[in-house]
Amino acid sequence: MDRKHARGVERVEHGSSDDPDVLDLSANINPRTPDGVEDVYRDALDDARRYPAEPPTAYRETAAEYVDCDANQVIPMPGGLAAIRLTVDLAVESGESVLVPAPSFSSYAREVRLQGAEPTFVPHDEILAADPAQHELAIICNPNNPTGTLYARDDLLAFAGRCREVDTHLLVDEAFLGFTGQTSLAGTPGVTVARSLTKLFGLPGIRAGFAVATGPLGEAMSAARRPWNVSVPALATGRYSMHQSAFVAETQRRICEERDRLREGLNDQFDVLPSDAPFLLVEVGEPGVDTVLSTAAEHDVAIRDARTFRGLEKHVRIAVRDQMATDRALEVFADV
């Protein structure tokens, strides 16, 4: 990345409200955290008087067990976006092309442009059939944000194989995969996986995550990673959270149940896309996005304006959280 490219790249909008009196359904965050995580964080403050271990071996080993890969392939990161940035930074040079799904997470195209490279947009439901040749990097979001599309693992592996054949690296963003039962692609040759811990475990402000990368790019990422790039409390809470399998299973059950209930409650009035993620994409048509957002605000609820995603003009995205949140969301749309 250099300043010539960075100066001309705009920031992208993300969900979330910082108003404590608003029910925030614009950001896809678990409203619950694992029991005991507060004590772990508090206890880690004493250790935070010293630099964290470098490399953070225990964190890498726990992450490797969490996604079933080799610990040497784990690159600790302060969140999934940091893993995405480092991958793009090392895989792409100015003037090159990157396959990017659309609509999808807007930061992919931003990170590509920061390198002076060009995103080549492909419909998210066609990207696994795209030809990766002539592209230095291909990006997949699984499940896709904002549509909630979960790609079949066999199809992902087949695409990864085609990428390897033409020396195109594949970046798979698994920020929401923990909400599903699908196995990670971590450790697959030619693939970098980006994982966020903060959405599933309800701790977005902690900034904890990791990448898993193999081969020469993995070696480059490990070498380029800044020392002490993840704080002591984030390492401690991340390690603790990744061991909470019962919490993950309960979260998956709850999200599935509430997602079905919310979709059923909206289907008679709106077009709601099927989803395997902790959110639903809703085409509101009439009365329109602005009316939906203003009605939600009157109910002290924040909903994501999906017009910020490429190609979406009549949509909102609603986070799926718990029974109370589903009830509040349905109240909003009953008043639209």
Image (cartoon, helix red, strand yellow):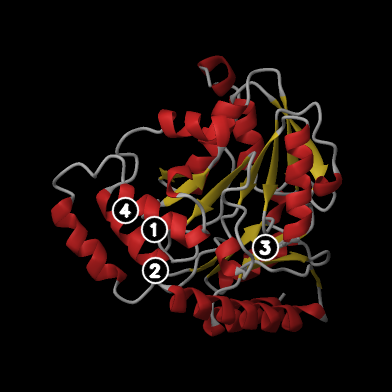
**Label 1 neighbourhood size at 10 Å, few (<14), some (14-19), many (20+)?**
some
Q: Which of the two labelled residues, at mark 4 and mark 3, occupies the earlier sequence position?
A: 4
Marks 2 and 3, how far apart at CA: 30 Å
Which residue is tagged 4? 58
Marks 4 and 1, how far apart at CA: 6 Å
Q: Name the quadrant containing residue 87.
A: top right
**Label 3 neighbourhood size at 10 Å, few (<14), some (14-19), many (20+)?**
many
User: Which residue is painted at 65% across and 63% down in the image?
Assistant: 293
Do the residues bearing badges 4 and 1 touch, measured as CB atoms within 8 Å?
yes
Marks 1 and 2, how far apart at CA: 8 Å
Marks 3 and 1, how far apart at CA: 33 Å
Q: Amino acid at mark 4?
A: Ala
- For residue 100, side relative to residue 248 (left or right): right
Spot occupied by residue 226 in the image (x, y as percentages of width and height): 36, 32
**Label 4 neighbourhood size at 10 Å, few (<14), some (14-19), many (20+)?**
some
Q: Amino acid at mark 3?
A: Arg
- For residue 48, side relative to residue 183 (left or right): left
Looking at the rendered image, the disc whose residue lies closer to the viewer, 4 or 3, is 4
Q: Which of the two labelled residues, at mark 1 and mark 2, occupies the earlier sequence position?
A: 1
Which residue is tagged 2? 243
User: Which residue is painted at 53% across and 22% down in the image?
Assistant: 1
Which residue is tagged 3? 317
Element class at badge 4:
helix
Q: Which of the two labelled residues, at mark 2 and mark 3, occupies the earlier sequence position?
A: 2
Residue 290 visible from this viewpoint: yes
Location of residue 181 with respect to 137 vertically, above or below: below
Element class at badge 1:
helix
